[in-house]
Image: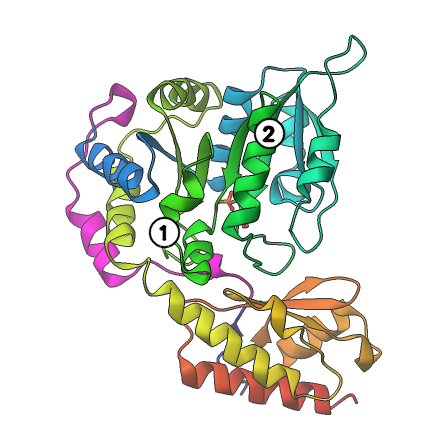
Amino acid sequence: MSPKPINLRSDTQTLPTPAMLQAIASAELGDDTYDADPTVKRFEAMAAAAIGKPAAMLAISGHMANLIALIVHAPAGSEVILDADSHIFHYEVGSLGSVAHLMPWPVTSEAGMLDPQRVAAAIRERDIHYPTPRLLCLENTHNRSGGRVIPLGLHDELCEVAHARGLAVHLDGARIFNAAIAAGVSVHAYTAKVDSVMFALTKGLSCPLGSVLAGDEAFIAEARHVRRRLGGGMRQAGIIAAAGIVALETMIEPLAHDHARARALAEGLARIPGLRVDMASVETNMVYVNHTATGRSTDQIIELLARHSVIASNRPPDHIRLVTNRHHDDATITEAITRVQAAINSIV
Ligand SMILES: Cc1ncc(COP(=O)(O)O)c(C=O)c1O
């Protein structure tokens, strides 16, 4: 019989904690569309304070919160500058075009680091032939580069470039608490210069649902309207907010353990002949492993690992991705390394 799989697919695999389930069961509820869910109100006030913005709104997903931010900041037909490797450009089903009616202007980054000069050059002058640029989107940590942390200095410079040219800045901070912890700065330092920020409750913070969009009062008032327009208005959303309160109170600091375990995992995997890990790239909870020396395709490696009871994600053509979360203790990481070693030994 195969052992229980070790699921390193994503930090989205986290399950609610017992404290969250208890909080959900005992939450005081009301109809949030009538502005009458006390748990949502309490959560949104806490979330605004935690992220360092005057106001915050609960949304059902990170994708929806990003989409709402795009719609509020940029009128249909205007242009959005963003990283060609960003989640919004890559994984959000093109909703910035099909739903928000925006023109994306993707800029290539180096491992998630946008170059301020390239961004400045991408902001086109007002011209009758061009859509008007309205918004710069940043992402931190940067998912497709392997959870890299955009340093605060670079982040501030990018905000300044955009603001100097009259663009707003939205931060896709699905994992902004991971970024702040890894960078050793307060999360407020990262949000001070952006006009809006999204953070996810469902990743390392372990909630079953939800994300937060934060900004100033006027931005959030408009965001509530757009959320409703998209069909994202909720009723007794206190069941989501109750878990969110537990997450804000107890789940932020422990993210540092996920980072330490990702590093231990990376070190172990880097010692396996046939695999290569750029240790400098392992800054938070993600490990990208280059498998080219095995001579197998990414999907073959994923399948092989699954047969050895390790679940990873594919990042073709050269990489697999493994992500740590609170369900992995030190022994699980050691066992994962042993299983990957056995899998790779069977083919090289
Ligand atoms: C950087 C980033 N932004 C946005 C999202 C979207 O979040 P959700 O899955 O809640 O829609 C994700 C999800 O993985 C993400 O990694």
Which quadrant of the figure has residue 77?
top right
Q: Position of residue 127 (x, y in %)?
A: 77, 11
Left or right, residue 16 beside residue 277? left
Which range is magenta?
9-36
Q: Secondary structure at mark 2?
A: helix
Quarter placement of the C terminus: bottom right
Left or right, residue 64 beside residue 17? right
Q: Is residue 214 above or below residue 167?
A: below
Q: Is residue 209 visible?
A: no
Mark 1 residue type: Ser
Left or right, residue 218 beside residue 250? right
Q: Is residue 131 visible?
A: yes
Q: Residues within 10 Å of mark 1 (few under 14, many from 20)?
A: some
Location of mark 2 (residue): 162
Q: Position of residue 8 (x, y in %)?
A: 53, 69
Which quadrant of the figure has residue 224?
top left
Label 1 to label 2: alpha-carbon separation: 22 Å
Mark 2 residue type: Ala
Residue depicted at x 35% and y 31%: 57
Residue depicted at x 41% and y 59%: 204
The answer to whether marks 1 and 2 mark residues whose Cβ atoms lie closer than 8 Å is no
The residue most toward the right is 295
Left or right, residue 315 beside residue 252? right
Q: Position of residue 42 (x, y in %)?
A: 20, 36
The residue most toward the top is 128
Q: In the rendered structure, does residue 176 fall within the stretch colored magenta?
A: no
Q: Is residue 259 above or below residue 273?
A: above
Residue toward you, 129 or 213: 129
Q: Position of residue 331 (x, y in %)?
A: 42, 86
| Residue 301 badge | none
Location of mark 1 (residue): 186
